Amino acid sequence: MSFRMTRALVAAATLAAGLAGAGAARAADTVKVGINNVISDVVFHLAQERGFFTEQGLKVELITFDSGPKMIAPLGAGQIDVGAGASSAGLYNAAARGINIKVVADKGSTPVHYDYMPLLVRKELVDSGKVRSVADLKGLRTGAVGPGAATNAKLAHILATAGLGYKDVQHSYIGYPQQIAAFTTGAIDAAITTEPSATQAVDAGVAVRFVVDGYPNQQVAAVLYGGDFIAKRRPVAERFMVAYVKAARVYADATANGRFDGKGAPEVIKTIMRTTGLKDAELFTKMVPNGVNPDGAVDMPSLAADLKFFGETGYLERPGKVDDVVDSSFSTHAVEVLGPYKAAQN
């Protein structure tokens, strides 16, 4: 082999190594994501395990928090880039305090047939005929996860259908899993309870699904971006959203018609069980899945309605606007890249 040919081969090998190195550098774009390891976090896990983040040149670290509100400060400080949050008064109060975070995509919503947060009523009250309609809830004890939560807005929406106000019932702050025990002991009479607690309470014979689809299309949970992630790493944030929306479409296919029986459902169920610690696969034949918009879009009308409720009930530190906390440009960009969602055919 001539010296000239050897030198050419070395140069080609060096160029190939350089290109590989450039690809590896892109793959090293790290994104830190706060999650709660609840069912609606499954889209993050699907994007991770199916290589959608890797396709976008991302290394995603999923960091567990024991509650959504605890992500707000780290998001604002740039310690994490993405959070799994909820529509709440706390979100608007954070914005009012100058904490720069934005709702960028749907993570959990309630289109018709996807009411994963029904109004439960204690079974004894229904069986005895003491509660036959929403109007009969007046004066009863209701459970809620905390003040200023989206579930409180939903309860108010349902009460209003019977001419009742939010203050016409009593409120006890109890976590979702603990609400099952509270129904059992009679500590609460009703609650907006999320899955899987809702199905577990019904299976235990302590509560019934009393109102389903009582607030269609409510935006309950959302993907949040920190301000630094948006301002300083926008191309990375855009690529993250492309991967997220791609995974959201896998989930949407698996939960078609509000059941865990669509295309690819068994694999999605396995991912949920692995990441949440749920052991009973039979639950998924009864549970109602949360909705996730397959194009990532959030429901602006419900956010506005809930914000109005937060203001009227005194949960806001100062008046706010939905536009203060929403940035839809990332989900819009993802749809431009992927094209509009087309439901899978079973």
Image: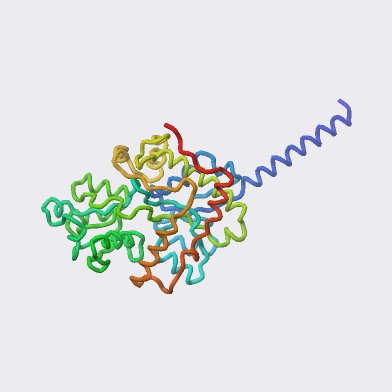
Which quadrant of the figure has residue 155?
Answer: bottom left
Which residue is at the front of the view, 71 or 97? 97
| Above-or-below relation of 212 to 230 | above
Residue 142: image x %, image y %? Answer: 24, 61
Q: Taking 176 as reference, is 298 left or right?
A: right
View extreme (left): residue: 128
Residue found at the far bottom of this picture = 318
Residue 3 placement, left or right of 86 = right
Number of marks in the image?
Answer: 0
Placement of 50 over or under 242, stated as above or below: above
Which residue is at the front of the view, 232 or 125?
125
Residue plotted at (44% across, 33% down): 345
Q: How is the image coloured?
A: rainbow
Q: Which quarter of the rendered picture does the N terminus lie within?
A: top right
- Relative to 288, does residue 69 appear above or below in the rendering? below
Q: Residue at x 39, y 38 (%)?
A: 270
- Residue 280 location in percent, x, y? 30, 39
| Figure quadrant of the C terminus | top left
User: In the image, what residue occupies the spot 72% across and 41% down?
Assistant: 19
Question: Would you say 126 lies left or right of 250 here?
Answer: left
Q: Nearer the viewer, residue 166 or 21?
A: 166
Would residue 147 appear left or right of 34 to someone viewing this image? left
Position in image of residue 264 (x %, y %): 42, 34
Position in image of residue 322 (x %, y %)? 46, 64
Q: Quadrant of residue 11?
A: top right
